[in-house]
Image (spheres, rainbow, N blue to C red):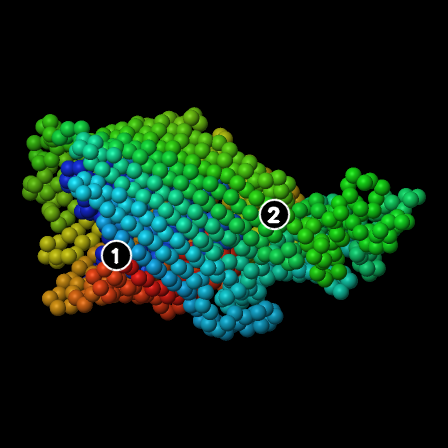
């Protein structure tokens, strides 16, 4: 009860502050007229009906161009992620498994369930590697406003609009020349003495006490002109953006991969990865190599029991470097009021590099399965005895009569070697997207009652990737099999060479092969590094063809209106043809690699009809300033065999001009996309949560967290129990892939809200909206944490079947150990909460005006039913939690509160307060599906308050200067050891969600002619 009172108090006080004290982000209840309007009517996001009094039945948050300028935004994703309705998705802070795109995730339902529009028309897939639209494609210099509609909108826009719609509206009536230049940089003071001492204790380099990094620059030109007769306009733009990289090494809280230590994991330690330097040797066959320690490592030419860890953190990017060019134009011309042709054309070229620590070498002379020949010439006598002699294996070689090498007398087949390829350098993925988008259409009046709009959109994204730093498994096996050449007369007689170059078979010779020393503990040769390294490339493309013909009409022109209404019935109807194609082509090196990727190609086509209706029932009567109902329907026929029906119904009731109530129900549908349907199976990463004893795999270590009986359910044998090696980074293998049998998702959205604009308080308005969204037949996969827990503790056969233990019981050292995560229609996902939007403008006689704006979201429910057959105990609620099954943080309350002072002295000042409430690790919950072991230091990610200040000054009528600082007080992000990559985790936190790189200082200059 106390907790609920606390929630209510927080909501109430925040709203009251919003009343007492912006133009930047506001509810769109009386939208601005469409600049391309033909008759004084308007169109709001979420409807195609043109009406003079159209008001949105769904809550819409609008962000205008001024906020992009006042906040120093060069990436649209940064401003979108600040909205409380938006959860961070792929973006600039992702490096490991980065797609190179920037995505929007409304309501935390996943970016595939958010539809992105430009001027009301779809953006294409973001990339053939990742489906959600890439908002890097949107030219920020031309943005007039962004409208964010939350809640299903499939009946109006089609598939994907389950969580809602983000509509970028671009300027299309610009006159003159506008030149903008913006620069910015991050600054941070490293002052955490505890973490700096921890770096000292581990011998790691400490970052400077003050760091400046991530320099950003963007330059843009917009040119526009109206035709001499005033009936048309052409606007063109061009921009260049360059963003420098930020390394995790620059921050004391990310310079080492944090782990937990202490009895209950209450203290930070520096952890790392089991893929280390020097090598780690793991026995995967304790029977065949009896007498050999399960784990050992080399040092100065000798083996000793133990294990190394590698601190991968300082090599990883906190912010990817990025370089983007955009170029485009748009125009329209009114030949007659009945014929107005228009066009849009745009090109984007974006290059970004994702960097992570040096790659891993894993395997042995038998390839990825391991093995080491006991006669290996690089082994010392002590090492031969340690590995082979102790197991009773001979260490001699077999040569033929001519001295040609035949093979070893014995191979230690049950040993797996893992090592960081530090000699090969960091892994780098050079990602390039080139996008071309073209829209052509014609609109106009059919008669006094009806208008039409016919358009065709074609967009194509070309993608290429060059990945550096991985090793060729076959070449590693060849180079590791080093022996002494005994062929008389050979140029290499008596020298250590690759076995393939000293046998009697000439067909397998490789002059590039150089012996690979993974056993001495020292660096291997540059020749060996060059031989095992390979460059992997991917090319591909995705394209969208979207043809829409729609008609909007006011039936009041024909007398079709109710007797109590002053406006007629509004309708809209039309047809749409939409085709998405995708082509994804990894090269042979990728397909043959240790973590292979395979080609994907396919297309989906939808043919649709749609219609809307808006019926004013009563207007301008006592207690009925407005009462109207609306509805929409869309029928979709997919070439993949689906036929879907989406629809909505809503009610608007305004008893007075100051008070309006709105409510709606919407059925939305999302059809599976090409990747979800047809992607081939491949090994990917999955992460487990750190347990109280510091382990991640509960069946690992000398004294496993789980019992033998429990671990046997996951595939562990009695011989393996107590000998399984854990991965200290928490990263394990997952087998992912498409499923052609997927069915569409279905979502039901309920919304109920009120808008209050009191006449006794001019300049004030408040909207409060409740939302409730349920997505059934959710397309996804079974979370490894779920399958592991259900198998261990509930003996669930299905969950156990998804766990595939590899050699020695591993789930990460070899590709035959993994969690199965093939796409399927899982259970359901429900979210519910309250959106609050308050605005107040105070005008003064001498001091200008002050504007206050509050946008906040209270999250009441985020509930997952993992499988259709899940029991009540298997359903879990993630509000206020993070990690484990809950994934990324799900705070109960987030808000953005902006105070803007427009002075009479050509100076504007803006102060922004961003707040994120605390979240607890999911295992602290008492829910049966979530409760479990956790490290104490991960118990809670504390609340965060961020303050941003900016100023704009009109130097001249046509010259404006902007300066500002975001995160003024350089607030550190909350830290955890369990931030999964797939949940946006990076650098011991969630950098797309929290400010992780210090304060951002920016300035800009805008000149208009």
The residue tagged 2 is 535
Residue 161 seen from this side = no
Q: Position of residue 264 (x, y in %)?
A: 54, 63
Residue at horizontal 62%, vertical 50%?
470
Looking at the rendered structure, the secondary structure element under dot 2 is: strand
Residue 508 seen from this side = yes
Residue at horizontal 30%, vertical 31%?
548
How far apart are the two marked residues, 2 and 1, measured between alpha carbons? 47 Å
Residue at horizontal 12%, vertical 58%?
761
Q: Position of residue 768 (x, y in %)?
A: 24, 50
Given this view, does label 2 or label 1 mark the residue nearer the observer?
1
Q: Is residue 490 left or right of residue 267?
A: right
Is residue 460 or residue 682 the one in the foreground?
460
Looking at the rendered image, the quarter that the C terminus falls into is bottom left
The residue tagged 1 is 1008
Q: Position of residue 309 (x, y in %)?
A: 63, 61
Q: Position of residue 466 (x, y in %)?
A: 55, 47
The reply to whether dot 2 and dot 1 touch (C-beta < 8 Å) is: no
Is residue 689 or residue 721 the one in the foreground?
689
Q: Is residue 126 left or right of residue 846?
A: right
Crowding near pointer 1: few (<14 within 10 Å), some, many (20+)? some
Q: Would you place residue 506 above or below residue 386 in this image?
A: above
Q: Would you place residue 869 above or below residue 427 in this image?
A: above
Q: In this view, does 439 lie to the left or right of 940?
A: left
């Amino acid at each position: 009860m106390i907790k609920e009172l606390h929630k209510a108090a927080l909501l109430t006080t925040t709203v009251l502050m919003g009343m007492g004290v912006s133009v930047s982000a506001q509810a769109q209840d009386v939208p601005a007229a469409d600049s391309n309007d033909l008759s004084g009517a308007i169109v709001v996001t979420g409807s195609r009906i043109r009406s003079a009094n159209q008001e949105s039945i769904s809550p819409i948050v609008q962000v205008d161009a001024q906020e992009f300028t006042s906040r120093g935004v060069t990436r649209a994703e940064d401003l979108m992620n600040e909205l409380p309705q938006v959860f961070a998705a792929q973006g600039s802070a992702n490096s490991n498994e980065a797609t190179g795109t920037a995505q929007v995730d409304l309501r935390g339902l996943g970016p595939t369930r958010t539809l992105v529009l430009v001027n009301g028309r779809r953006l294409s897939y973001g990339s053939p590697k990742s489906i959600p639209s890439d908002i890097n494609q949107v030219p920020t210099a031309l943005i007039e406003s962004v409208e964010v509609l939350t809640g299903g909108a499939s009946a109006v826009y089609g598939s994907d609009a389950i969580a809602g719609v983000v509509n970028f509206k671009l300027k299309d009536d610009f006159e003159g020349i506008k030149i903008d230049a913006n620069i910015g940089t991050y600054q941070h003071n490293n002052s955490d003495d505890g973490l700096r001492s921890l770096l000292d204790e581990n011998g790691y380099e400490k970052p400077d006490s003050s760091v400046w990094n991530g320099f950003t620059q963007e330059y843009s030109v917009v040119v526009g002109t109206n035709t001499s007769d005033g009936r048309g306009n052409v606007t063109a733009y061009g921009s260049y953006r360059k963003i420098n990289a930020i390394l995790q090494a620059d921050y004391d809280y990310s310079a080492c991969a944090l782990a937990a230590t202490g009895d209950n994991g209450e203290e930070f330690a520096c952890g790392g990865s089991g893929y280390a330097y020097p090598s780690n040797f793991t026995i995967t066959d304790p029977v065949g190599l009896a007498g050999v320690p399960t784990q050992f490592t080399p040092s100065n030419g000798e083996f000793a029991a133990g294990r190394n860890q590698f601190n991968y953190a300082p090599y990883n990017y906190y912010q990817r470097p990025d370089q983007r060019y955009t170029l485009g134009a748009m125009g329209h011309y009114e030949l007659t009021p009945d014929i107005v042709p228009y066009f849009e054309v745009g090109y984007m070229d974006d290059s970004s590099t994702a960097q992570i620590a040096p790659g891993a070498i894993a395997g042995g002379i038998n390839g990825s399965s391991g093995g080491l020949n006991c006669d290996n010439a690089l082994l010392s006598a002590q090492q031969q005895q340690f590995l082979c002699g102790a197991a009773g294996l001979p260490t001699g070689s077999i040569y033929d009569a001519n001295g040609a090498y035949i093979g070893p007398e014995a191979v230690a087949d049950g040993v797996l070697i893992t090592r960081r390829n530090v000699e090969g350098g960091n892994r780098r993925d050079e990602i390039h997207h080139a996008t071309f988008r073209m829209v052509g259409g014609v609109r106009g009046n059919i008669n006094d009652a009806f208008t039409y709009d016919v358009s065709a959109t074609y967009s194509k994204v070309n993608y290429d990737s060059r990945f550096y730093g991985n090793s060729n498994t076959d070449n590693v096996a060849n180079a590791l099999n080093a022996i002494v050449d005994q062929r008389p007369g050979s140029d290499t007689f008596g020298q250590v060479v690759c076995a393939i170059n000293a046998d009697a078979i000439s067909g397998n010779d490789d002059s590039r092969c150089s012996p690979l020393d993974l056993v001495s503990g020292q660096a291997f040769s540059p020749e060996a590094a060059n031989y095992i390294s390979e460059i992997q490339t991917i090319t591909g493309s995705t394209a969208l063809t979207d043809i829409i013909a729609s008609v909007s009409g006011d039936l009041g022109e024909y007398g079709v209106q109710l007797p109590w209404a002053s406006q007629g019935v509004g309708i809209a109807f039309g047809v749409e043809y939409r085709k998405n194609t995708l082509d994804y082509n990894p090269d042979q090196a990728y397909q043959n690699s240790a973590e292979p990727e395979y080609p994907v190609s396919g297309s989906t086509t939808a043919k649709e009809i749609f219609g809307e209706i808006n019926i004013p029932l009563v207007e301008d009567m006592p207690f009925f300033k407005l009462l109207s109902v609306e509805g929409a329907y869309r029928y979709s026929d997919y070439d993949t065999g689906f036929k879907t029906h989406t629809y909505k119904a809503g009610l608007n009731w305004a008893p007075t001009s100051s008070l309006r109530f709105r409510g709606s129900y919407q059925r939305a549908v999302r059809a599976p996309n090409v990747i979800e349907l047809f992607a081939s199976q491949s090994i990917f990463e999955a992460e487990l949560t750190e347990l109280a004893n510091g382990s991640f795999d509960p069946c690992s270590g000398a004294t496993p967290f789980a019992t033998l009986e429990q671990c046997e359910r996951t595939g562990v044998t009695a011989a393996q129990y107590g000998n399984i090696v854990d991965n200290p980074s928490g990263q394990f293998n997952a087998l992912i892939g498409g499923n052609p049998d997927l069915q569409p998702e279905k979502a039901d959205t309920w919304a109920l809200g009120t808008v209050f604009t009191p006449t006794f308080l001019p300049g004030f308005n408040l909207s409060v909206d409740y939302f409730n969204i349920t997505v059934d037949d959710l397309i996804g996969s079974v979370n490894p944490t779920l399958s592991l827990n259900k198998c261990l503790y509930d003996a669930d056969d299905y969950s156990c079947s998804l766990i595939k233990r590899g050699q020695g019981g591993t789930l990460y050292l070899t590709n035959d150990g993994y969690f199965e995560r093939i796409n399927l229609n899982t259970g359901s996902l429900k979210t519910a909460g309250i959106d609050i939007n308050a605005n107040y403008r105070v005008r003064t006689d001498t001091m200008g005006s002050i504007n206050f704006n509050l946008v906040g979201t209270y999250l009441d429910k985020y509930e997952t039913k993992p499988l259709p057959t899940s029991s009540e105990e298997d359903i879990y609620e993630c509000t206020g939690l993070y990690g484990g099954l809950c994934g990324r943080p799900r705070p109960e309350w987030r808000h953005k509160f902006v105070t803007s002072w427009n002075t009479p002295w050509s100076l504007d000042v803006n102060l922004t307060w961003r707040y994120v409430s605390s979240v607890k690790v999911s295992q602290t919950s008492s829910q049966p599906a979530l409760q479990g072991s956790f490290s104490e230091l991960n118990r809670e990610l504390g609340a965060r308050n961020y303050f941003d200040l900016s100023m704009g000054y009109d130097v001249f009528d046509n010259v404006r200067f902007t300066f500002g600082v975001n995160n003024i007080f350089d607030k550190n992000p909350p830290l955890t050891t369990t931030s999964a990559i797939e949940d946006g985790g990076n650098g011991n936190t969630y950098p797309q969600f929290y400010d992780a790189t210090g304060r951002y200082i920016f300035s800009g200059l805008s000149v208009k002619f």
